[in-house]
Image: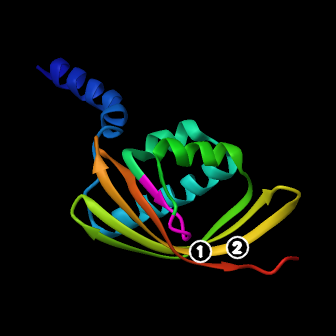
Amino acid sequence: MLKQIAFVTLIMTALLPVCAQNIVAPKTAQNVSNQLLALESEIESAVVRGDVAFLDTVYATDFRFTHGTGLVQNKAEWLTNVQRISYIERHLDSLEIEQHGDVALVTGRLHVRSHKGIGESRYGISYVRVYAIRGGRWQMLSHRSIHRWDLPTK
């Protein structure tokens, strides 16, 4: 009997790290905030790298990107935009997260530097993003730019 208990304990100890990867953490407000803050940062880094493979996994199938100009792009159009534009930097600040069960709103500001044509473009935007848990993970459903302003050139 002791050998069986020892064997089960050994197996459980070995499998615990593997099983734990598939367990969703409790949805406390702090956990959700930390998850979404990290995801926001990963998304902006991926846009700068042009990593559309990663972005394809975090944007929902029905994702919409609404620019401050009113232009609305679906997921495929936005990913094409990411590949076309050479982003130098996308810096987040003033992020706030509001959770409603499996849905969350993220508001924030984004400072953008990119190459456009022969020069560099610098601007800031304030935005609202909507996330939902789909397939056990957070996916962005929508990005809406609310306000845009030019940033000083250095």
Question: Helix, strand or loop at disc 2?
Answer: strand
Q: Quadrant of residue 69?
A: bottom right
Residue under the image location 55 percent in, 36 percent down: 53
Q: Is residue 131 above or below residue 13?
A: below
**123 or 94, which lies in front?**
123
Q: Is residue 19 above or below residue 50?
A: above
Q: Is 135 on the left or on the right of 107, as rendered?
A: left
On residue 125, which mark appears?
A: 1
Q: Position of residue 89 (x, y in %)?
A: 72, 61
Point 63% across, 53% down: residue: 45
Which quadrant would the C terminus be assigned to in this image? bottom right
Which residues make up the magenta segment?
A: 64-70
Residue 66, magenta (yes or no): yes
- Amino acid marked by disc 2: Tyr
For label 1, count other residues whose C-alpha is less than 10 Å away and answer few (under 14), some (14-19) or many (20+).
Answer: many
Q: Up-down: is 70 above or below 118?
A: below
**Residue 114 image position (x, y, % from top left):** 76, 60
Depth check: give the residue in front, 52 or 25.
Answer: 52
Dot 1: element? strand
Q: Residue at x 59, y 74 (%)?
A: 125
Judged from this view, the residue extending furthest toward the left is: 1
In the rendered view, would you say 21 is above or below 89? above
Q: Is 26 placed left or right of 77 in the picture?
A: left
| Residue at which label 2 appears | 123
Quadrant placement of the N terminus: top left
Rendered image quadrant of residue 6: top left
Residue 42 in percent (x, y) is at 56, 53
Q: Which coloring applies here?
A: rainbow
Callout 1, which amino acid? Answer: Ile
Image marks 2 and 1: residues in contact by CB distance under 8 Å = yes
The disc placed on residue 76 is none
